[in-house]
Amino acid sequence: MIQTCTELAALRALVAQWKREGLRVALVPTMGNLHDGHHALVQVARQYADRVVVSIFVNPTQFGPNEDFSRYPRTPDADIAGLEAVGCDAVWLPSVETMYPLGVERTTRMQAPGVSEVLEGASRPGHFDGVCTVVARLFLQVQPDVAVFGRKDFQQLAVIRQMVDELSFPVQIVGAEIVREPSGLARSSRNQYLDAQQREVAATIHRTLLGMREGYVAGHSRERIEAAAAAALQQAGFQVDYAVLRTPDLLEPPHEGGARVALIAARLGSTRLIDNLEF
C-alpha cells in the first residue's frame, strides 16, 4: 500500500523507520502530471534501493515570469494511482508553504555556476537556480541514498551532479534513459499541449538529433551540423532556441574522439520541447 505524506514530520518518521531497518531509500523528484517516462524512473530507482519515494511539487522558483507555472497541470490523484501500480512506496506532496516557509521571495537560493548559465540557462534565466534550490531542499527533507533523474533534461542532470559533487551531498545520482514514443518523440508532460498533427511534427526533433550524430560521424564540421539542424527544424515549423553539439559538461564544443551530446530546444506553437542524444 503506497503511503502519502503531506507533512514533513510524517515523511521523516517514515524514512527514519526504513533506515533503522537497514533499507536503502531512493528519491524520484517530479512536478507531477506523471506519465510512462516517470514510471520508468521509479523502476530504475527500484534497482538501486529497497524503498522509493516520489516527490510531487510544482516548483514556482524554476518558472520564469512569462512561463507556464499556473498552466502546469496538477493531477495528484491520478499520479498517486499510477505510482502505486508501478510499486512506489511513498509519495511526498509538500505545499509551497512547507517547501518555502519564508515565502518564495525570501527563500535561501542555490546556484551551480557555469553549467547552469548556458543553453537552457541562457534561454531561461534563473531556471536552474530554482532547480538547485528545490532539489537541495528535497535531499534534506527525504535524505535519500540515491536520486534518479531522467536524461531528457540533460542539462538539469549536469547541474545537479555539479551541485552534489561540490557540496558533498551523500546522495548517489543516477541518470535514467529517455523514454520515447514509437515515433521517437521523447515522453514529456508538455506533449499533451500538442494536437495530433503537432505530435507528428514534434518527432522531427529526434530525427534531427539522429541526423546531427550522422553528420558528426561523417566528419562534418560542428558549424555545418548545427546550421543544418536548425534549418531542418525551422522548415518543419519550429522556432529554434538552440540546436548544438557539446561536450557532456556543456561548456565546450565536442573534442576529437571524445564524448559528445546533441541538444535541441524548440517551440512548436506555444509548446517548448527539449531533447538530446548522447553518443
Image: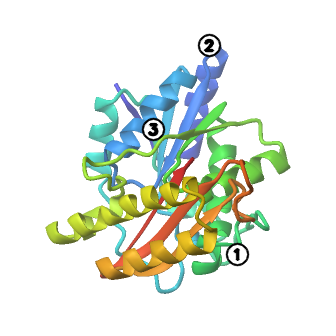
Q: Quadrant of residue 115?
A: bottom right
Q: Is residue 115 shown left or right of residue 278?
A: right
Q: Is residue 127 visible?
A: no
**In terms of depth relative to the viewer, which is nearer, 46 or 215?**
215
- Taking the spot 68% from the left edge, 72% from the top edge, the residue there is 118
Name the side, left or right, on which 105 lies relative to 94: right
Q: Nearer the viewer, residue 213 or 52?
A: 213
Q: Secondary structure at mark 2?
A: loop
**Contact flag, marks 1 and 3 (Cβ < 8 Å):** no
Q: Which label's residue is closer to the chain start, 2 or 3?
A: 2
Q: Which mark is residue 41?
A: 3
Q: Position of residue 261 (x, y in %)?
A: 59, 55
Q: Secondary structure at mark 3?
A: helix
Identified at 83% across, 42% down, the residue is 168
Q: CA distance from mark 1 to mark 3?
A: 32 Å
Label located before the other in sequence (1 or 3): 3
